[in-house]
Amino acid sequence: MTAFTEASLGIPEGELLRSRVVSDAGATLAAVLDRELTGYAVFEPQDSLLGGGGDPAVLTFEDGVPVLAYDAGADRGGPDALAALDAAGPFRVELYGLAAAAVERLHRDETCRVPPARPADRLAADPELVERTRAAAPADRRADERTAVEAFLADADRIEEIRAEARREAESRAAEWGLSEQLEE
């Protein structure tokens, strides 16, 4: 599994701290937060454990807080990569420790970045873990925690595009049904 991480993300080989099969990815996130791990976790899905060849996913951490996510099977990073961990366990999880300087270089690349509490929110049925993770995140990263709705509402151009599209659709339907005069400008 280490060869995967080195090839895909350029993660240097870390010190193996723990290798286990777990049924819940949330338990691993809680353990990482509790031990304030700086390093990464490689999640190998159930398919792979059973000889099906499933591809691993990687989460990197700084002081126990998730920073990057990468799904090798779909070759995608960021919040979308968390879909690889949505499947029911068990997962084989290997935790690796790295020096802060080694992960600092990795974490400069924002293409695979995840909001700090997103993995816990998506993978664990534990609101307390979500809040603990959010509280442990550095202040500058908490801004990444906007929900999808908040991000959408902040995008005035996209909202205006949707309004214009709805207006065109309404005008088209009104013309089709002979109600064009009833529309107010």
Image (cartoon, rainbow, N blue to C red):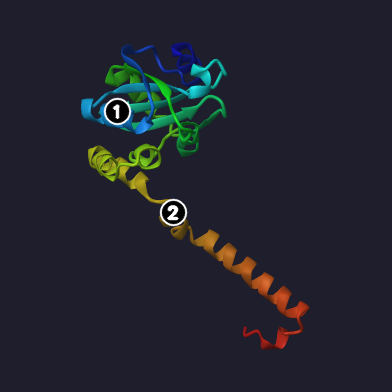
The answer to whether residue 111 is seen in the rendering is no
Q: Where is residue 127 in the image (x, y as percent from the top left)?
A: 29, 45
Q: Position of residue 25 (x, y in %)?
A: 38, 30
User: Residue 85, relative to residue 182: is it above or below?
Assistant: above
Circle 1 crowding by C-alpha within 10 Å: few under 14, some 14–19, many from 20: many
The tag on residue 153 is: none
Amino acid carrying mark 1 in the image: Glu
Nearer to the camera, 31 or 67:
31
Q: Which of the two discs, 1 and 2, labels the residue nearer the N terminus? A: 1
* Distance of label 1 from label 2 (alpha carbons): 25 Å
User: Label 2's element?
Assistant: helix
Q: Quadrant of residue 135?
A: top left
User: Residue 159, relative to residue 78: is it above or below?
Assistant: below
Q: Position of residue 110 (x, y in %)?
A: 43, 34
Residue placed at 58% from the left, 68% from the top?
A: 163
Q: Could you tell me which quadrant the C terminus lies in?
A: bottom right
The answer to whether residue 26 is seen in the rendering is yes
Q: Quadrant of residue 176?
A: bottom right
Residue placed at 49% from the left, 17% from the top?
A: 49
Residue placed at 62% from the left, 69% from the top?
A: 166
Residue reaching furthest bottom? 181
User: Label 1's element?
Assistant: strand
Nearer to the camera, 29 or 92:
92
Circle 2 crowding by C-alpha within 10 Å: few under 14, some 14–19, many from 20: few
Q: In this view, does 78 lie to the left or right of 171?
A: left
Q: In this view, does 64 lie to the left or right of 41?
A: left
Q: Are marks 1 and 2 in contact (CB under 8 Å)?
A: no
The tag on residue 151 is: 2
The residue wearing badge 1 is 62
Amino acid carrying mark 2 in the image: Ala
Q: Where is residue 140 in the image (x, y as percent from the top left)?
A: 29, 42
User: Residue 162, relative to residue 30: is it above or below?
Assistant: below
